[in-house]
Amino acid sequence: MNDNAETKPITPCLWFDGDGEDAARFYCDLFPDARIVAATPVAVDFEIAGQPFVSLNGGPQYSPNPSISFRYVCSDEEEQQRLTAGLAAGGQVLSERADVFWPQDSVWVQDRWGVAWYLLVDASAREAQRIVPVLHFGGDQRDRMDEALELYACLFPRIRPGDSNGAQRYAALERKGQQCLLMELPGPKTFDFDEGVSLTVYCETQEEIDRYWRTLSTGGQEQMCGWLRDRFGVAWQILPSILPEILSDHDTAQKASEALMEMKKINIEQLIRAGKGYA
């Protein structure tokens, strides 16, 4: 495996109905150490505390929900209160004491677009990854977390399973320093994984694309343009790292885009050839 490919973080993609840039700019104004990286009418790349995100103007079909939430480590209680107020405006506080999930007092808040955030103050975690995706397994999927850990081992070579906070189980996965958490959610299931929040994996080689696609799509659903849903319903995009370059090149963008729209699993060689007019 090309080691450079795994240095690019898995990137959450948030689905919006035309207001993706408004949302990205809102987050960048609200969170410290946040910035817009690039913007087009279709998608906005932005970062919060070094974690890349994409806001996608995909239309009305989907919207974010708390099935995948984002844990954010605040510098102090004042920052936690400020972020809670900002995110809850037009949204809602899901839990004012979310320490059923964490040893520390924290707040679980869903913003006006449906994106959910865990805001906690934890001095021991301030030097680590400040934003961590959290995948919730609840309801009829609550007993499938171990199965998910086995599946996601293809992406996250380091797994620390079996941690608990009382009756609550959660596990940490790590990929080149980037963490992701899986958590059993107590109570009845109130939301499902879908394309409202997807996770993008950038690959350097066709071998990587083939391996991730084969593993994650087994028992799930293959979709167009590198999208798939795994057996638990989690939406993934398996994309070549060269794709942004191809689609931003005036000489290759149109033909490559046309070829991309015909693909499910992306074939890098075919995409490059199409962009050059050889398809």
Image (cartoon, rainbow, N blue to C red):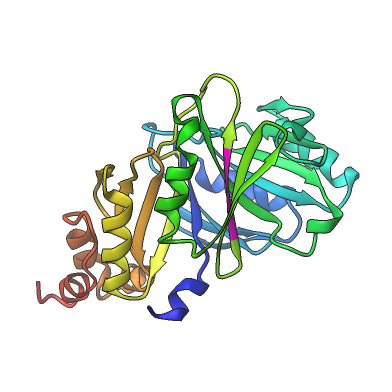
Q: Between residues 64 and 247, which one lies in front from this camera angle? A: 64
Stretch of the chain drawn in magenta: 179-183
Q: Give the total number of marks visible in the rendering.
A: 0
Does the rendering let one see residue 113? no
The answer to whether 64 is drawn above or below residue 7 in the figure is: above
Residue 115: image location, x then y, percent: 58, 37
Figure quadrant of the C terminus: bottom left
Which secondary structure dominates the residues rendered in magenta? strand
Residue drawn 49% across and 40% down? 145
Q: Between residues 92 and 94, which one lies in front from this camera angle? A: 94
Does the rendering let one see residue 209? yes
Figure quadrant of the N terminus: bottom left
Residue 49: image location, x then y, percent: 69, 60
- Residue 53 on the magenta segment: no
Residue 231: image location, x then y, percent: 33, 41
Q: Residue furthest top?
A: 188
Q: Is residue 208 left or right of residue 234?
A: left
